[in-house]
Amino acid sequence: MASVSGRWALLAFMNLLFFGCVFVVVFLAQFLFPPPLYSGGFSMVPEVFLGSWFTMVLGVFAFNLAVSAFVVVTLPGVVFFPLSTGFLLFRAVLWGLLLCPLPTWLFLAFLPTLVLEGEAYVFAAVAGTVAGVSWIKPEYAYRGEGSSRVEAFKKALRECLSVYVLVAMFLLVAAVVENVTIVLLSSF
């Protein structure tokens, strides 16, 4: 938590940027795309999602942690720090487009998952941004501690690892909530 508390302004900015972008895209898509043809029933959940509950949770968690959070959001920011924010915004646009045609009751059913996963991706973007800034401008990343680029990058990677503990916790809870929601909705 100490790593995150020192970056509260960046975290708040990324949260505002991500969730604000999702909201704006959903709002604009209402005007740009025709309303979906919706008969009122919930579509069938593919059988692959109705396997072992533990396998479902583990699969969703592992994919979201390794691919969605690390490879897509954090790793590009380590290379060049604005890329974490860029890919976070790209994910927000995609989420907005996916959420737009959902009926209200289905959106509300998946809202807890969206908030938990979204927050995990925001933390992942903050980790990538800090790691990327640390080797480009070490005095900014660690507030004039006199670190060399290599020392600042090592500190940033340790900070990134501690932030990833929070990312993993958010994504694990989100995977459980998502799978419970899918199982409950498939019983309707």
Image: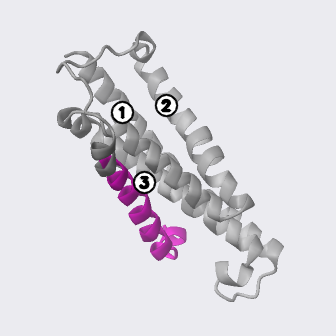
Percent coordinates x, y for residue 42 in the rendering: 24, 19
Give SS at disc 3. Answer: helix
Which badge, 3 or 2, comes first in the chain's sequence? 2
Q: Is residue 22 visible in the rendered structure shown here?
A: yes
Q: Which residues are magenta?
A: 1-26
Q: Which residue is mark 1?
A: 178
Which badge, 1 or 2, comes first in the chain's sequence? 2
Give SS at disc 1. Answer: helix
In this view, the residue in front, 60 or 75, is 75
Q: Is residue 160 visible in the rendered structure shown here?
A: no
How far is the residue under mark 3 from the one under mark 2?
16 Å
Residue 166 covered by magenta stretch = no
Q: Residue at x 29, y 17 (%)?
A: 43
Amino acid type, residue under disc 1 in the picture = Glu
Q: Which residue is mark 2?
A: 60
Q: Residue at x 19, y 37 (%)?
A: 104
Q: Residue at x 42, y 18 (%)?
A: 49
In this view, the residue in front, 74 or 21, is 21
Q: Which residue is mark 3?
A: 119
Percent coordinates x, y for residue 36 in the rendering: 27, 28
Which image quadrant is residue 78 in? bottom right
Percent coordinates x, y for residue 91 in the rendering: 50, 47
Q: Say if mark 1 contacts mark 2, CB within 8 Å.
A: yes
How far is the residue under mark 1 from the one under mark 2?
9 Å
